[in-house]
Image (tube, rainbow, N blue to C red):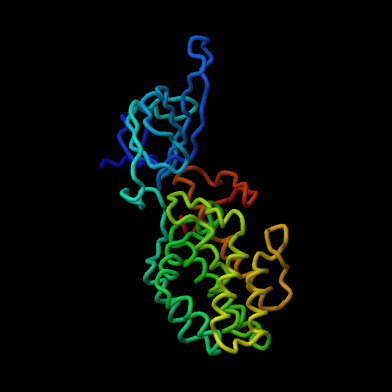
Amino acid sequence: MKKQLIRSLQVGDEVETQALVLECSRGSYSAPHRAGEYFLKLLLGDVSGTIKAILWDTAQLKEKLQKGDVIFVRGEVNDYYGPQVVISDLRKLDPEKVNRSFFQPVSDRDPREMLGELKEIINSDINNPYLKLLLLSFFNDKEFTRRFALAPAARTIHHNYAGGLLEHTLEVIKICRDLVSLYPEKLRLDLLLTGAILHDIGKIEEYDPASLSFEFSDRGKLVGHISIGKEMLDQKISQIPAFPPQLKLELEHMILAHHGMREWGSPEIPKTIHAFTLFHADLVSARLNQFVQLMEKQPSGAGDWTEWDRYLERSIYRKKLPDEE
């Protein structure tokens, strides 16, 4: 089946491609003779970008169209406050039979390579037998490992692509390792790395694995990845005989406090040095990824400043230093 990248569509182009419905709303006709009739206003997307679309003739729809559907669409691009696809023909596709790489951005890194790196860290750097057994109880589970390797770290903010959770986790580990080298007498490497590896495990259930746009699952909306992660941790620990209660308490607090502040969704603020260190390592990884993504989003030759980013609350100055030009 044909696939035109949305980024390449220009006014006047004939369209015949697959697209993901990102937004879908009804519009009513103002003409009295069309009272009760409606048209559809859509936002279509793929891995390359988004475009507005409109379907005037909704009589052709055989089933209700909604956000998250994958469709095959024919039409033409016109200009209505920017490019807009006027749809002449549309049909829904089975999301299980489409190429997910058309719609889901993925990490630049190979997930198998990243998993190998993570497992080497568990084998070589986790000396405490209880912590090692805990981590292996997660990563010897093939289904858990598969979902962990494919999950995003977020929907929109940072590492928001397939494999993003694994990439983010490895970044947090590296930052934690550097911080331990600065405070070797105060920080335990294996404990801090265990917290880094497990801090976001709840995200494998927070997002719907069937969604091409990383929509939240019902449990993700109602419980959230922090509480889910603590539940997963407690379940695994309950299966390990004589797991030290103080070690369990430390790990629970690291997961519950890793967002750092209550206004950022953290049930607790960090009150141990390991939780405090993990929070800052997590934040640095997330913020730098946001910053880099915004810098790379700006097309070449589009000026020295990026567009305004509402999450970072700034534009970014990108002008290269003289020795880079």
Q: Residue furthest top?
A: 33
Front-lying residue, 124 or 199: 199
How far across and down, in percent of the image, does residue 220 sit?
A: 57, 57
How far across and down, in percent of the image, does residue 191 sit?
A: 60, 82
Quadrant assignment for the N terminus: top left
Residue found 60% across the figure and 59% down from its top: 224
Judge left or right: residue 56 versus residue 199. Answer: left
How many tags in the picture?
0
Q: Relative to 266, does residue 218 appear above or below in the rendering?
A: above
Judge left or right: residue 77 versus residue 253. Answer: left
Judge left or right: residue 4 versus residue 303. Answer: left
How far across and down, in percent of the image, does residue 60 sit?
A: 36, 26
Residue found 43% across the figure and 70% down from its top: 145
Residue found 45% across the figure and 85% down from its top: 123
Q: Residue furthest left?
A: 1
Judge left or right: residue 184 versus residue 38. Answer: right
Residue found 44% across the figure and 57% down from its top: 209
How far across and down, in percent of the image, does residue 52 sit?
A: 46, 33
Q: Relative to 20, does residue 270 appear above or below in the rendering?
A: below
Q: Relative to 31, does residue 67 appear above or below in the rendering?
A: below
Front-lying residue, 167 or 29: 29
Front-lying residue, 180 or 229: 229
